[in-house]
Image: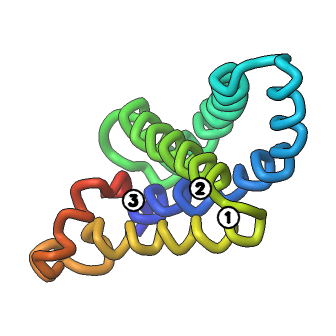
């Protein structure tokens, strides 16, 4: 149960990153049209900021969980698995926020997509029970 929560938590927690991109959209478009920076520069700076803070916060949280319940193995491997899942969740949140016309749509689409990932990742259904026409979805599932 702990390992499931450590995989599902970063995916659902990525919803916290959606408002920052949606709310700043008009400011970003205005400044980009004025030639202040490129889209790639904005995206890389946002990602660097978020991923640096996520690395620091996830170190403490995973250490608390790993040593608190006395898991076996390497803490660094546990932290890296959590951090990589968190990074993919943040990128997914930014992707959905960039495609959504407003905050309400983005806040509805992200959990909807994450729930489909839980279905096809083998957590709620066994991989053998997934219909053949949906089995491809399990290969693009980062939670798996």
Q: Where is mark 2, residue-wise?
A: 96
Kindly indicate the quadrant of the structure image that contains residue 63.
Answer: top right
Horizontal relation, residue 48 to residue 66: left or right: right
Q: In the rendered image of this protein, does residue 77 appear above or below residue 37?
A: below
User: Which mark is first along the chain, 1 or 3?
Assistant: 3
In percent of the image, x 69 and y 70: which residue is there? Answer: 105
- Between the residue at mark 3 and the residue at mark 2, the CA separation in whole angstroms equals 26 Å
Residue 18 point in image, percent of width and height:
71, 54
Q: What element carries label 1?
A: helix
Q: Is residue 14 visible?
A: no
Query: Which mark is nearer the camera, 3 or 2?
Result: 2
Identify the residue at horizontal 39%, vertical 59% (top origin). Answer: 3
In this view, the residue farthest toward the front is 33
In the displayed structure, 51 sits above or below 68; it is: above
Residue that badge 3 annotates: 3
Q: Position of residue 86 (x, y in %)?
A: 53, 45
Q: Residue at x 29, y 54 (%)?
A: 140
Quarter of the picture containing the C terminus is bottom left
Q: Nearer the viewer, residue 54 or 71?
A: 54
Q: What label sits on residue 118 in the rendered view?
A: none
> Dots 3 and 1: beta carbons under 8 Å?
no
**Along the horizontal axis of the image, is 119 left or right of 58?**
left
Quarter occupied by the N terminus: bottom left
């Amino acid at each position: 149960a702990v390992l499931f929560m450590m995989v599902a938590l970063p995916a659902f927690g990525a919803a916290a990153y959606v408002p920052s991109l949606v709310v700043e959209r008009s400011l970003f478009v205005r400044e980009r049209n004025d030639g202040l920076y490129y889209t790639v520069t904005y995206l890389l700076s946002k990602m660097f900021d978020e991923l640096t803070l996520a690395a620091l916060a996830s170190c403490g949280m995973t250490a608390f969980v790993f040593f608190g319940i006395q898991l076996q193995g390497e803490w660094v491997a546990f932290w890296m698995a959590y951090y990589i899942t968190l990074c993919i969740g943040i990128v997914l949140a930014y992707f959905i926020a960039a495609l959504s016309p407003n905050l309400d749509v983005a806040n509805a689409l992200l959990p909807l997509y994450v729930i489909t990932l839980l279905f096809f990742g083998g957590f709620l259904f066994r991989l053998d029970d997934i219909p053949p026409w949906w089995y491809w979805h399990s290969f693009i599932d980062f939670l798996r």
